[in-house]
Amino acid sequence: MSCLLETPDKPIALPKGSSHEELTLALHNTQVTAIPGHEKFKSLKATIPIVVFLLPAVLFLFVFILYPLLSSFQLSLLDWNGLGTGERFVGIANWLRLAQDQMFWKSLGNNLTLAFFSVLIQMPIALILAVVLDQASKSSRVLKILYFLPLLMSSVALGVLFKNVYDPNFGPINGFLSAIHLDGWTRDWLGDPRLALGSVIAVVCWQNIPFYMVLFLAGLSSFPKELSEAARLDGASDSTIFWQIKLKHLQGTIRTAIMLAVIGSLRYFDLIFIMTDGGPEGASELMATYMFRTVFSSFQLGYGSTIASAMFMIVTFVAAATMWLTRRYETEVK
């Protein structure tokens, strides 16, 4: 003989005279079999707030990044001045023209030169300033503010300021050289094709060093003081602590700084545009300034979009290569 145990899902047959423990076990097994469906519902319910909060970010990403990017690739297949409806489909003609455009390759070389010297100059100076300020007393707060001032200045104001500083006739650089009887060293700093790019790179580095200084200061502030104290007890000097312990602790921060410097240099525009406008004779031309002039001065929207699309691919490739190289170096050091 058996009896039926009614459950919400289905009746369960139990032997007659089943004990209380057997009834409890049967109910538990029934609940276990019903849990997966209930868990799926709870999981689905938990994902709704996630989707709601992510939706604005996804829409922003699509509207302001993905859509313009796809539109740029689409426009690169057209011959169009950007005005009216006279666009003409030319396929890959713009890309073939870009491959043979000497000015584009020259501007790419200038971008890579800017990226190289940005890393070579900005990283060491910023790291030295960060270490000095990290070890200084509380009065270093004033120095931190003073060192950070260049980054707070508008790029337009900075460009106009240094354009006057480099002025060959009335600029303070040539004036100082003349005052100490070094007239042979006076130059047209922004008008000489051999000096124009280097002169602007110096200003770019001066403006951006404070940013990386603050980045390194943040990394040093997270360094455990117990490690330094333990190393000193073992007889390590300050230089040994820095090179063998602190520098390894900063590897992730340094990799991030190098990435930002390289990507920012490949996309750079403002100071070059203000100080030299890509001149003289294209000596300081960058990809961004060349693209701007192609679209807004020559009214070649299709070819300008080709330059913009090529910039995106180049920046993506160089950034990926930089990330791989820096990560590989970090692994070897560890």
Image: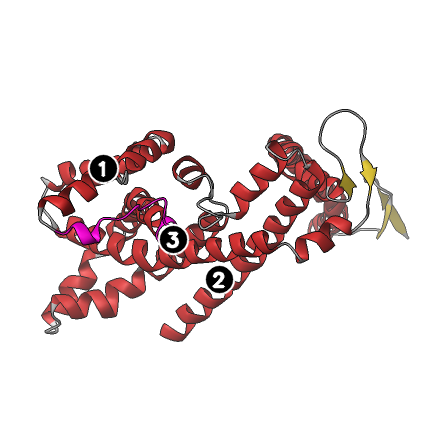
Q: Which of these two is toward me, 117 or 100?
A: 100
Work out how far the residue at label 1 is from the one at label 3, CA to CA, in angstroms. 33 Å
Residue 54 in view in this figure: no
Using a 10 Å C-alpha cutoff, classify the residue at mark 3 as few (fewer than 14 neighbours), some (14 to 19) or many (20 or more).
some
Q: Earlier in the sequence, mark 3 or mark 2?
A: 3
Which quadrant of the view contains residue 161?
top left
Which residue is painted at 31% across and 46% down in the image? 189
The picture places residue 141, in percent across and down from the top left corner, at 15, 38
Work out how far the residue at label 1 is from the one at label 2, CA to CA, in angstroms. 38 Å
The picture places residue 213, in percent across and down from the top left corner, at 27, 48
Residue named by callout 1: 171
Residue named by callout 3: 257
Residue named by callout 2: 322
The C terminus: image quadrant:
bottom left
Q: Earlier in the sequence, mark 1 or mark 3?
A: 1
Residue 187 shown in magenta: yes
Which residue is painted at 55% across and 53% down in the image? 315
Secondary structure state at the residue bearing disc 3: helix
Are the residues flagged by discs 3 and 2 in contact, CB closer than 8 Å? no
Secondary structure state at the residue bearing disc 1: loop
On residue 100, the disc is none
Q: Earlier in the sequence, mark 1 or mark 2?
A: 1
Work out how far the residue at label 3 is from the one at label 2, CA to CA, in angstroms. 11 Å
Q: Which residues are magenta?
A: 182-196
Q: Which of these two is toward me, 44 or 253?
A: 253
Question: Which three-letter amino acid code belongs to the residue tagged 1?
Answer: Gly
Question: Which three-letter amino acid code belongs to the residue tagged 2?
Answer: Thr
Which residue is painted at 50% across and 58% down in the image? 109
Question: Which three-letter amino acid code belongs to the residue tagged 3?
Answer: Ala
The picture places residue 32, in percent across and down from the top left corner, at 72, 50
The picture places residue 50, in percent across and down from the top left corner, at 62, 36
